[in-house]
Amino acid sequence: MGAYIVRRLLATFPVMAVVAVFVFLLLRLAPGDPAALIAGDDATSADIDAIRAKLGLDLPIWEQFVLWIADILRGDLGVSIFSNLPVTVLIGQRLEPTLMLMLATLFVAVTLAIPLGVLAAWKARTAIDRIVMVFSVLGFAVPVFLAGYVLIYIFSIQLRWLPVQGYRPLAQGLWPCLQGLILPAIALGTTYMALIARITRASMLEVLAQDYIRTANAKGLATRRVLLLHALKNASVPIVTVIGIGIALLISGVVITETVFNIPGLGRLTVDAVLKRDYPIVQGLILVFAGVKVLINLMIDLSYVFLDPRIRY
Amino acid sequence: MGRTTSVFRGLLLGSVSGLFLVHAAAAPALAETVLRASMHADVRTLDPHWTTQTIAGIHGMLVYDTLFGVDDELIPKPQMVGDYKISDDRKTYTFTLREGLKFHDGTPVTTNDVIASLKRWGAKDQAARAMMGYVSALEKVDERTFRMVLTEPYGLVLDTLGKTGTMVPIIMREKDASTEGNAQVTEAIGSGPFRMLKEQWVPGSKTVYARNADYVPRKEAPSGFSGAKVPRVDRIELLWIADAQTRMQALIAGEIDFLEQPSVDFVPILEQTPNVKVIRTGSVDSHWGTIRINHLHPPFDKPEARQALYHLVKQEDFLQTIVGNPQYYRVCYSFITCGTAYADETGKEQVGDYNPKKALEKLKAAGYKNEPISVLAATDHHTITPASQVLLASMRAAGINVDAVSIDWGSVVARRAKREKPEAGGWNIFVTTSSGVSSLNPALNTWLGAGCEKANVGWPCDEELDRLRAQFAFAGSVEERKQIARKIQERAVHVVPYIIFGQWTQPLAYRSDKIDGIVPVTGTTVFWNIAKKG
């Protein structure tokens, strides 16, 4: 197991290297020029060239790449072209809102989806099953931004229960923080709830058809015990996989939610940096995202060992 | 080990500082008055001389002060300057600073600071460069008095020093102003009515300012950018809310007090919302739209081909598409902002003659052989994108072979600087907008410049037009200027540096139950004199 973890961690280095090359080239080959954006409408070509030189963007691409890689190896993700602040500080400022939004979303999605999925499987082909599945299809179909606007209109504008926008850090207290996360977590969580509920239902249906479940029922075990202890645990490998994939998807999913609810997280930072061609921020963020995704995949793979004793590494 | 972990240390530091600083920012003291304003963009840089972004100018007007400021009638009035004298030959200006001016670090503002700031700005801004071309000396007389000596009696010195919008001639500390022009000033220590709380700055989200208790306002009543600039709230939070609908909802819910540029689609909703007021931003229209033409490449290297494009533009179509409400727009055929002193609509019969069929005929007569016309069409701008689509539709309706290059605005800005042929990565046409105040003076309207390779992108090249613009700068009276402005208009109609598709004003909205004292100005936003109610 230990050797497996070390092997997997070592394997992240070539993955990160490939990501680094791709993101660097993609940004440099894409149209757009931060120097022109900085210089603005009244600037002459000479002004733009001077800014480009100051930013080091006039150097050959290979030279820019070598300098960037050298900085990364020194533990330096660079400095934002526009704000002149270190990329690590900018990412650090945005980490908490995104993490809290992801946690809240997962909480909403998992706590509702798994019971709904189990219920649908237990009551398969009944009205309850169909209601749950219709709800799941709706969850997939309704875009996050639309759900967000509807929730804001009802709960913030009409009922005045929750704020329209903004994020309050945990340091201000749990409730003020949660107040700003409830609507975004519901808006974003609906999609994941639908996904997880469907997978839970399908996986549970497969397990519920197994002989040992029939045996458990024949022994007279309580339905709750059969469903939760015997069936759900054995159905959990695909569910955990989907939850893990969901976490990875959330990294991109939060962009729209952060925009609609004005949460100053990593998603907004990424979009703003791309639009402004703030290369150091985009490069730093994508490396961080890639690292997080690799780690999440590793954690999912490791969790299989605990969920299914037959799996060994 | 230490180096490799510095990324994580940075992340940790950022997280912790973000945690506590945002907490501090969002938890003002009990009696503190806080103005929360949602802006059109986020404050991305602290150096107003580093970029022409309007938001950098707004930040600059909060933190710094200027020597002169224009009033509601756009007449420059002294601001940091107490007294000034102009020599009889109009070649020597002597300025004396007001007493008691101090930077936020407590040091007094001296002529050393002023001269260093003017030199830095003079190397960056186009209007400043035009003026500095005639400045032979900027001399210190004493700590509060300095002299500007000109080689010629350039007539726009005070107008240039009172410039608003972007690249405003703000006064920095000498040590900041000594920073090379293409490098950023990383501190925000000015002598303006508000201090920036840099440690609470979250780029892309929030910028925070506090009242400058040491600021000494002028005695005169506020008027535009002149008169008393009184900081009447303890704290200002400039918020960047990316989504237009969320911005509007935040104002309706009372979470923000001030919405700088509500989307025009939402203005009717805001106008009907209790306790929300929508007002114009000053007497001059805030924006004008322009179709910029590349003069370097066929067919638009010939004036006849450029003039043919007049027949493609029906301004109402553009204005209806991007603004909608006639209350906020106007048709204008002048190269100078309509509604201002030097506007002149001579040639409107030609400029306003919408006739796509005639456009194609004239283009063919000018040598157009159905080659593709490359139009850079931005896909992500709230006004430029729809305006580009109107132009493309009109060109196609005329039967012109259009190569619509659909790219984001950042890519348009990069590509429009390329002088290559369209097929080699250059361009023929793009649509843009500009500030109304930037084009109310023919000599300072850089889009009107026709100095060939020295001109703005598109590179118009016409000696006569540039000679007239220079002549305007030396005119001795308003009447003389008006006469020259008419000649400039006539010449510009022939040269076609750009085609106007109308002008409009971007209203602002605020909570009338929570704040008052807004000073409406055009082209930017100011926060002095705004007070919280109750």
Image (spheres, coloured by chain):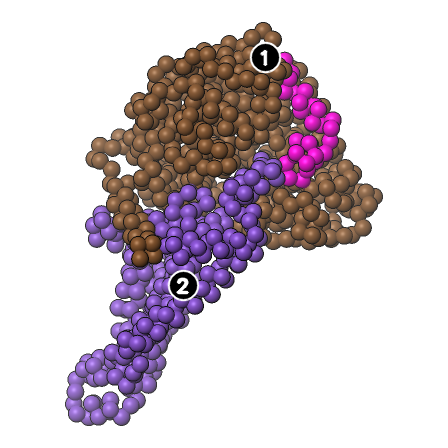
Chain colours: A purple, B brown
Q: Amino acid at mark 1?
A: Lys
Based on the displayed image, in which of its 4 quarters is residue B40 positioned? Answer: top left
Give the image location of residue B23, x and y in percent. 25, 44
Residue at x 27%, y 32% (from the top left corner): B33
- Report if residue B160 is visible in the image: yes
Q: Are marks 2 and 1 on the same chain?
A: no
Which residue has dot 1 on it? B91
- Report if residue B251 is visible in the image: no
The residue lying furthest to the front in this view is B1
Q: Assign a secondary structure to mark 2.
A: helix
In the depicted structure, whether residue B360 falls above or below residue B150:
below
Location of the N terminus of chain B (image quadrant): bottom left
Marks 1 and 2: in contact by CB < 8 Å? no
The disc numbered 2 marks a residue on which chain? Answer: A
Comparing B383 with A284, the one in front is A284
In the depicted structure, whether residue A1 falls above or below residue A187:
below
Give the image location of residue B53, x and y in percent. 49, 38
